[in-house]
Image (spheres, rainbow, N blue to C red):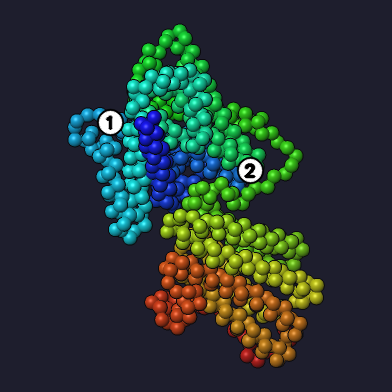
Amino acid sequence: MTTYILKLVSLLGGLALFLFGMDVMGKSLERTAGGKLQTVLAKMSSSVPKGFLLGLAVTAVIQSSSATTVMAVGFVNSGILTLKQAVGVIMGSNVGTTVTAWILSLSGLEGDSFFVQLFKPSTLAPLMGFLGIVLYMFTKSEKKKNIGCILLGFMALMTGMELMSGSMKFLKNEAWFANLMVSFSNPFLGIFVGAALTALIQSSSASVGILQSLCSTGAVTFGCAIPIILGQNIGTCVTAMMGSIGANKNARRTAMVHLYFNLLGTLIFVVLFYGIGLFFPWKFLNDPCNEMNIAVIHTAFNVGATALLLPMNGLLVKLATLSVPDDKKEEKTELLDERLLGTPAVAIQRAHEIAVRMAEDSFEAMSLAIALTRGFDSKTLEQVLALEDNTDRYEDALGTYLVRLSGMNLSESDNRILNTLLYTISDIERIADHAVSVGQAALEMEEKKIAFSDRAKAELEVLEQAVTDLLRRTVDTYKSLDLELAATIEPQEQVVDALVREVKSRHIRRLRDGLCSVEYGFVLEDLLTAFERSADHCSNVAVEILQVSEGKLEAHEYLNSLKAGELRESAVFAERFARYKAQYAFPEEPKEDKTPQ
């Protein structure tokens, strides 16, 4: 009894180390891939084969088909992917998850040559662990530290695998264990056990690893391994099914596609393989199975099922649609799905996309509002108000989402994007508020029949063009997070401030000379305030992008130092300011023109 207890403790310890290593390695791979992973996901198209390749690549990176599938559910729920696009991603994830089994198959290497001994886990794991800890502790580069974590995760993974295998070797001589393995040769029992184990630990890669470690006993035959592996592919669907709870119908259909893909693949394999076996018995089924054989079976099944069902993706969609039928209830698409938080790099990218959408809406709102000052239209004003409502909704959703992301383990680049968004979304939203102010000023002009003079119109057109160009440049900067582009915002904002001051000065002179009405001045003041403050928010956005990237000065301190000529870029700033000032020049005022305007 003592032996059993000690071996059980060793097994549990090995399993804990194995799962920990898989988790560390997967998350470190994700952080290292970071931007590349986001780029791959951004290129998803309606092509199912392309979605397959993308799903395969992402799963190979994050080492979890369950995470990829839950991600696909989140994308569909957010409206990023259609159900058809998700089919290819799901199929690719099933093939991508087989990579882990091949890594674990290294424990089955046999031979006396130097290279075989080098790649055995007992040698390779300590070597990877030593290199990993050197990179993690003695380097400053985030990329090198992440590589160190990957190597440490690999060491933990392989050490856990060795510990599990060692703790179960004594079962080789246990008759009850041999009988248990034989019972799993029953396809239905084997499939059930494989599905139950995978559903319990919610990782097909981990359950395949456990099966590979059992091979050390010599009691695992092909006959019991095959149905267990089939069941493991079904059990991994549980994670996506749970992840789809509360999602819209297409997201739930995505989880059903994953389930039907594995069910149909298993059913077809069972009918063909065991059907043929009834007439031509498979003699190898009673042979012992090793770690490499497990990896081959796992890969062969997933690749075969994909090759068969990929052309039949329409059938999977129909089955999922029948299982989750349409209803009359209108469903809302989630802007920022919580399911994506499981892969922070992807969640950051999604948050950035929504923030850019908010910036585009603010720009469009201001452009429409400016057009209203030249020719009023009530429908256009309604569009401005609707766009401003959108920005409010975006800001509320982003604020909550980004705060949740801030508590996660992010890469340095993702953390910069997170901080940039946190510091700037309020500025972006305020631009839409000022667009509403411009629209209301235009409404007042329409109701009170206020018309600007030709001279005033010419001056406002220059200012409005400068503001529009500044907003467009800010949106482009926000989208690309380009530091060079961000550095051009502040000098242009200073030009807008100068233009506003000049418009006010000219208005006061015309007011003094009796060439302009006081009523016109009230409307003009509202417009100028909205334009100047919008430009200020553009400046805030650009400065935050620059400061977050450098992590040095506060925004106000930076601006004061820049204007005082204390920073290296001050000369460049002055040159840009002069260029923009020349670009947005007012027409000269007539010197002695007393004609009312």
Q: Nearer the viewer, residue 53 or 440?
A: 53
Q: Are marks 1 and 2 in contact (CB under 8 Å)?
A: no
Task: Identify which amino acid the numbered label 2 is placed on.
Answer: Ala
Q: Kindly state the secondary structure of the residue where label 1 is placed.
A: loop
**Residue under the point 52% across and 34% down:** 199
Q: Nearer the viewer, residue 415 or 363?
A: 415
Q: Is residue 53 visible?
A: no
Report the disc number at residue 174: none
Residue 166 image position (x, y, % from top left):
32, 33
**Residue under the point 69% across and 33% down:** 325
Question: Pointer 2: what residue?
Answer: 247
Q: Is residue 65 visible?
A: yes
Task: Name above or below for residue 317 compared with residue 410.
Answer: above
**Badge count:** 2
Q: Nearer the viewer, mark 1 or mark 2?
A: 1
Question: Pointer 1: what residue?
Answer: 109
Q: Kindly state the secondary structure of the residue where label 2 is placed.
A: loop
Q: Badge 2: few (under 14), some or many (20 or more) residues near its Cα, within 10 Å?
A: many
Q: Quadrant of residue 245?
A: top right
Residue 73 image position (x, y, % from top left):
57, 41
Q: Earlier in the sequence, mark 1 or mark 2?
A: 1
Task: Name above or below for residue 594 compared with residue 200.
Answer: below
Q: Is residue 68 left or right of residue 453?
A: left
Residue 451 image position (x, y, % from top left):
75, 76
Question: What distance separates the C-alpha of mark 1 from that of mark 2?
Answer: 45 Å
Task: Name above or below for residue 46 compared with residue 588.
Answer: above
Task: Identify which amino acid the numbered label 1 is placed on.
Answer: Leu
Q: Quadrant of residue 392?
A: bottom right
Q: Badge 1: few (under 14), some or many (20 or more) residues near its Cα, within 10 Å?
A: some
Residue 335 image position (x, y, % from top left):
61, 51
Task: Name above or below for residue 361 compared with residue 197.
Answer: below
Q: Is residue 153 left or right of residue 322?
A: left
